[in-house]
Image (cartoon, rainbow, N blue to C red):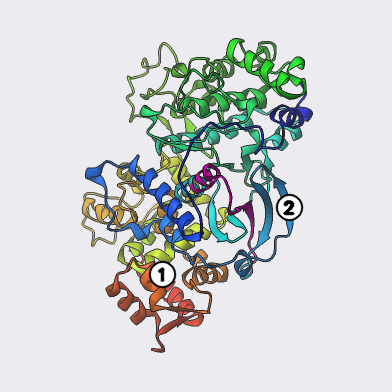
Amino acid sequence: MTTTCFGSLCESICGGTSGGGSCSSSSSTRKLAGRGSFRDAVVDEIAELRRVNTSPSNEDTSNASLTIENLLLGQNPMRKLTEVYHAPERRLGAGAFGEVWRVRHRSTGTKRVVKKIKMQPNMDPEDLEFLAKELGVLLRLDHPNVVKCHDWFQEENGLFIVFELCEGGELVDFLNATDKREKPAIADVMSQIFAAVAYCHELNVIHRDLKLENCLLKSRDSESLVKIIDFGLCAVTRLQDAKLKQKLGTPFFLAPEVIDEKRNYGSGVDLWACGVIFYVLLTGHHPFFTRDCGAPGRIGQQRLFKRICSECPHQKPLKQLSGDARDLVSRLLHKDARQRPNAKLCLLHPYFKAVGGEGSGIRLQRSSLDGGAPLSSDESSEGGADENNISRKSKRDSFTQGTVARWAANARSFYRQEKFAKIFLLIAAHQAASKDLEEIQKAFLAADVDRSGELSREEVRAIFEGHCYNNAKPSTSSGGKGDKGEERSAMTDAEFTRLFDSMDSGKTGNISYTEWVASVFEKSLLEQEKTVRSAFEFFDLDGNGAIDRTELLSLLGGDAGEVDKTMKRLDTTKSGTVTYPEFSAFVKELTQEMTENPH
């Protein structure tokens, strides 16, 4: 099989585009009808996602409104897509549930993508259940390698989910366009896919439909981010308890345990799919497809399934690969899901070190983590590394002391702000273009040592350590000079604790990607007209051109005291509402505070 026909072969076997060819045996009985009840179902799905990831003793809902998913859910349910975006410009694709179109934001001109899903009164409750789960998961997931959900609209004729635009195309396009397979490029792509899968699995989300078509490139740049999309078939369940039975997915990428109706399955199905993707990227061939699998209808599919369940991957294409590449492929395509390494272990495989793939600027070295098959027989021979000791080339030194000191100053400013200002910064961070966040993004990925997709207290400390963190000096110290005369100020343990707790807006004990961006958000980005305009329109729930007390009460979680403080600061004309000029003046005041009080 050649690379140029891979997409068409996948389509012929699966019986259609990426949305087709899936099978389901779910017996969901939830009745979803009407606009309010669907939103309630989405809220339930987010609550379930939180439940499986939070022990009752650690649960904290006091600051729930300071999470992106709650802010996005708080939008006016009566809004219409065409009130915020121009009419869809160009259709990008279609699937079993609907169509994907490119749209442009009316105020900022930002190009995005909208997934249009038809919702009819007699729609199957099971399909509605999947839609609610998909939207709930998309609103909750927050990682550079997972597609970002910017907005959503529920109208009488359908559901519209707005995503960031990924202009680099699908991995199928990458495969077909790459004449010479450059191993570092493939290693970088795979490390990003594994990072996204590791994050999802950390949150007990199993994708269940990973494939080339569901891995997009953010841009056409050679160092583009990879984005995982389409969580329409995902499952939310504690991984250690996962005993899934539904026969879902695209046949080309199904694991043996999904095909076998007698078996349950769990997160290992995502690792199998990663193995198929990896094999195809390295060789240009599918690991199990043969010519007789191309027979029309179920005959070809049954032959493919038989090979997946009983045959070894094609060995001839693997002979041209390095031993490390062959080893990782064989581990991922092991018939026994228990023998497949988890995504974190995959990132530590010698293959990535050997080919120099750094995965979004990160070079990982081998270590030992619990929860998957060992990397090799001598995995613990290099110093006995434990699960929290992931050795790697530090990227911290690639950021100047001035850059990190500026981030620390911004974090201090974030700590001093009242609740409304923090919500504004969270929204600004969420809406910001990826290209404007490259340094901040790289720092987040480099600091995420355990590849959980969030930053722990020690991981955040490591970013600031050596640049502006000095336990020996009091917090009032002005510090000294860093490299090239850059000013730096000291940070005590006590101050760091206060800053970290402030950055942790959702009170989860870790810092999410958007929380990190919001805390260190650059002054130059806050001053942009599109940043101010998009945030104002987000707060103006009814779209009448002003923010009133009722809207603030909704945004601030019903805290009347915070509403009073916000109105006092923003409503300078005492009109009872906040106009755009007043909101713009508030943002200007905020940026001036960041400049005048850097430490």
**Quadrant in which the N terminus is drawn:** top right
Tag of residue 595: 1
Q: State the image coordinates of residue 255 (x, y, percent, origin top left).
A: 56, 22
Give the distance between the C-alpha atoms of the residues marked 2 and 1, in whole angstroms.
44 Å
Between residue 276 and residue 439, name the one nearer to us: 276
Give the quarter of the figure containing the C terminus: bottom left
In the picture, measured across the screen, residue 493 lies left or right of residue 78, that is left
Q: Is residue 565 magenta?
A: no
- What is the x, y in percent for residue 452? 40, 38
Q: Amino acid at mark 1?
A: Thr
Query: Which image quadrant is residue 354 in?
Result: top right
Question: Can residue 144 be seen in this snapshot?
Answer: no
Determine which residue is flagged by label 2. Answer: 91
Residue 469, image x, y percentages: 30, 50
Which amino acid type is marked by label 2? Arg
Residue 446, quarter of picture: top left
Q: Which residues are magenta?
A: 109-132
